[in-house]
Image: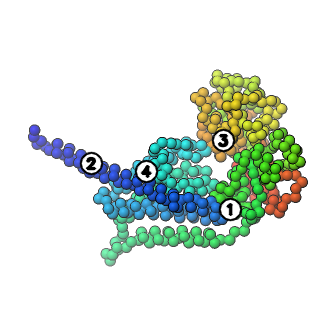
Amino acid sequence: MSDPKGVIADTEKGASMRTAWFLPWLGGTFMFGLFSVMFNVIWSIAVASNVQFLLRHAGVTDTAVIVMIVLYAWIVGLIFAAYGALSARFSSMRKLPLMLTGLLSLLCGLWLWIVGLQGSGGQPAEVWGGSWELFSLYHAWAEPVLEVLQPYTQHSEIWFLLTALLPIAGMVVGVGVDRYPAVTGRDGKVDHKWQWVVAAISAALVIVLTITLMLPRRPYIAERDFPVVDGATAAIPFAQDMLHELTGMSRARAAHELKFNTTHQAYVNLIEKKADLILVAGPSDAELRLAKSRGVQLKLTPIGRDAFIFLVHRSNPVNGLSSDQVRRIYAGYIHNWYEVGGKDQPIIAYQREENSGSQTYMQKKVMAGHEMAEPPRELRIGIMGEMINAVADFNKDHNALGYSFYYFANVMHNRQEVKFLSIDGVEPNKEHIRSGQYPFTAQLFVVTREGEKPRPSMQRLLEWLQSEEGARAIERGGFVALGS
């Protein structure tokens, strides 16, 4: 059969050209992925864990930590740029297809970023499967950076995106530099300006890091003399800021060093003299009895305020309750959302474990002498974050009710699936906490043992907590300072 217009030949030629372009691109993509995995396996074993240890434990300032992170990322970017330059040198592919060989890894990074946006409190949600395992290998270089950055920012999802883009950006720059390696001057000679730029930036980072490491520090309280502090989960950000402010310890190291044991265990540790002071809500009756049995009198000094809030799933049509309705629900007199203006669905009212800070506040302040109904075991929550997760993740009816403290639920363990109920027509927010309009306002106490003469570092800490500087730290920690 004749082909006078050459249609068949043109079709075969086009298919051949597409194959000639696609197969090298696919091979290049595979090689980039393989390089990324091999690099990260070696890097994480030889370098990443040591960098993480250094950033967490070294006695350096926040400025030095940030410079170290930038220098670390710069070195990783240069390594991927070197890979891009070598690929351009030995590959016959054109510049644009060669740059796109990192597309698959870039899509993995964007996918992880989207998953992170849907996670709890801005943190990536739990994922699994082969694609996640491969990406974990590809992304391993960034793990020490992301963990150390957490105390410095509440927008970790942005850093996931940027760290996913860095290897691709490095490779693209490397390809561009190799294909356009220099600028030709008027005299016809090649001027490798980009090499001087790389060298200058690298030297500048090293010089800045050296200067920041040599700067003298004069802490308000020496690290070795800092009192043993314990407390509630919601007070952790404030306590980390306090440790940073008073000792000069970097925020990254303060976040690693300071560990709290929740409200009840903090009271136990204070009573048993395993802690010097604790940052908590008021004690339960059981904790007061324990203190009395050990001959310890607790001294409670209020330093800040928070709101005790009630939360439901965002799809629940109920936006507010009265104080009396809350009490009647938890006393077992109201069982259905229909009775408070919602759907005809049973109210699944979660409670916390006995002696937790939120359960103590619920019993003493909210119920105001009314007995709480005994919940089934599966509706009693041990950890504060699990209460919020339970409401957010409850079945399709979305008829759960829970409670927490405002700062913890709004910042530390934020879930977009839940909403906070107004109480007696007043929304829980900082303005209403400050004005006293919100009916369930909780106090943050610094609790010590009465009758003991504090050592000098302890006295300085107590004075700082009640100073203007301490009030500003309390505000940064998410609470409303007293007198503000």
Asked if residue 367 lies left or right of residue 167, the reply is right
Q: Name the residue under label 4.
A: 105
Which residue occupies the extreme bottom position in the image? 187
Q: How far apart are marks 4 and 1 (CA)?
A: 37 Å
Under mark 2, the amino acid is Arg
Using the rendered view, name the quadrant where residue 361 is placed. Answer: top right
Q: In whole angstroms, how far apart are the C-alphas of marks 3 and 2? A: 53 Å
Kindly report the distance in space between the C-alpha atoms of the residues bearing marks 2 and 4.
22 Å
Q: Which mark is residue 18?
A: 2
- In the displayed structure, 218 sits above or below 388; it is below
- SS at circle 2: helix
Residue 164 pos. (x, y %): 48, 53
Colour style of the rendered protein structure:
rainbow
Label whose residue precedes the other's in the sequence (3 or 1)? 1
Q: Residue at x 35, y 60 (%)?
A: 87
- Residue 48 visible, this orientation: yes
Looking at the picture, which amino acid does disc 4 mark? Ser
> Which label belongs to residue 385?
3
Instruction: Residue under label 1, please give it.
Output: 249
Question: Which of the image's four quarters has the N terminus?
Answer: top left
1 or 2: mark nearer the eye: 1
Foreground label between 2 and 4: 4
* Label 2 packing within 10 angstroms: few (<14), some (14-19), many (20+): few
